[in-house]
Amino acid sequence: MTPAQCRAARALLDLTQPALAEAGQLGLSTIVDFERSRRAVSAEAVDAIRAALEAAGVLFIDQNGNGPGVRLKERG
């Protein structure tokens, strides 16, 4: 997951950085620093961010090699 995918996923969910930090059981600074590429964030933290976003309904995609993206899961 890239920082851009994280920002896009939050936007799709209308989720704030503090809410994502809480959902992923991480510090707010970890979310902010990851999304702004301020520092290297541990793989475990990135996994926790991704898991929280996926649990909220996001799918991470790479369509036909055109680069990374996100979309909401189909409901039904």
Image (spheres, rainbow, N blue to C red):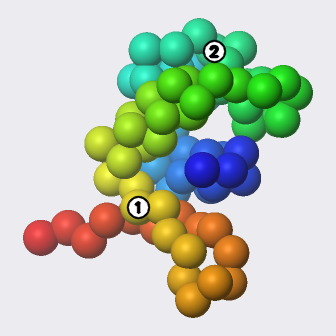
Please, which residue is most extreme toward the bottom here?
A: 64
Q: Quadrant of residue 29?
A: top right
Q: Residues within 10 Å of mark 2 (few under 14, many from 20)?
A: some
Q: Position of residue 21 (x, y in %)?
A: 52, 20
Q: Nearer the viewer, residue 29 or 12?
A: 29
Q: Is residue 22 above or below residue 71?
A: above
Circle number at residue 59? 1
Give left or right: position of 75 versus 1.
Answer: left
Q: Position of residue 16 (x, y in %)?
A: 57, 32
- Write down the quadrant of residue 28 in the picture: top right
Say above or below: 14 vs 42.
Answer: below
Q: Residue furthest top?
A: 27
The reply to whether discs 1 and 2 touch (Cβ–Cβ < 8 Å) is no
Residue 64, relative to residue 33: is it above or below? below
Identity, as a three-letter code, of the amino acid under mark 2: Leu
Image location of residue 63, percent across then percent down: 55, 83
Is the residue marked by circle 1 packed among few (<14), some (14-19), or many (20+) residues within 10 Å?
some
Return the mark for residue 48. Answer: none
Which residue lies at the image location 73% right of the left edge and 31% below the top edge?
Answer: 34
- Helix, strand or loop status at disc 2: helix
Looking at the picture, does residue 47 appear above or below residue 74? Answer: above
Residue at the extreme front: 43
What's under tag 1, amino acid-wise? Leu
Q: Nearer the viewer, mark 1 or mark 2?
A: 1
Query: Residue at 84% of width from left, 35% of height from top?
Result: 37
Q: Which quadrant holds the C terminus?
A: bottom left
Per the model, the C-alpha gap separating discs 1 and 2 is 22 Å
The residue at 87%/27% (across/down) is 38
Which label sits on residue 28? 2
Residue at horizontal 56%, vertical 74%?
A: 62
Q: Is residue 31 visible?
A: yes
* Secondary structure state at the residue bearing disc 1: strand
